[in-house]
Amino acid sequence: MFSFLLFLGILGIASVAVAALVGWLARNFPRSRNTVALMLTFCATFSLGFSVDLIGQGFTGSLPAANAIPPIFTWFGIGAFCQMLAFYTARSRWPLFTPHILNGILAAFAGLSHPCHFFVAFVLFFIATVLYVAKPRYRVALI
């Protein structure tokens, strides 16, 4: 139990450090906001894709559920955190959906050898579509 709490503490400290670094980069180097968002989205698509792959392996029985559940929540949390940071850092849409499309294409090609990866590709394409629709094309000034 102590090791789990230690892991959560380290993960929390790391997430605060990453959020502070991203905020500092966005404030001091405003032209690099899309680049930072692109790197965060690459981390998010890797984490979310791995989480969805673990879910697929758990449902098909190729991975025992007891071994799949803790990593699913860990990788999903990391991916969601990185994606939220990227969403608020990006100035335009392209850094948010491009990595998901690229990873979805790779997963679709991997699906030719193992059909479970088609599910991963579908979920990544769905996430890319949601991010494309959710982010406005231009920043809207609220009065």
Image (tube, rainbow, N blue to C red):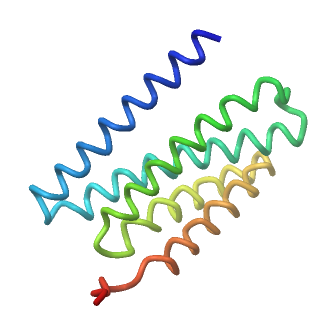
User: Which quadrant of the figure contains the C terminus?
Assistant: bottom left
Horizontally, is 94 left or right of 73 in the view?
left
Extreme front residue here?
143
Question: Toward the viewer: 4 or 68?
Answer: 4
Q: Residue 71 occupies which quadrant of the picture?
A: top right
- Residue drawn where x is 57% and y is 74% of the image: 129
Q: Residue at x 64, y 53 (%)?
A: 107
Q: Is residue 139 positioned above or below 57 on the image?
A: below
Identify which residue, 9 or 123, lies in the foreground: 9
Depth check, front residue: 66 or 122: 66
Residue at image point 32% right, 45% down: 19
Image coords of residue 135 (percent x, y): 43, 77
| Residue 48 percent coordinates (x, y) | 59, 48
Q: Nearer the viewer, residue 24 or 109?
A: 24
* Residue 138 to residue 109: above or below: below
- The answer to whether residue 14 is left or right of residue 22 is right
Q: Residue at x 61, y 48 (%)?
A: 49
16 vs 107, left or right, is left
Residue 105 x %, y %: 58, 61
Q: Residue furthest top?
A: 2
Q: Give the image location of residue 68, x and y in percent.
A: 75, 30
The answer to whether residue 95 is left or right of residue 2 is: left
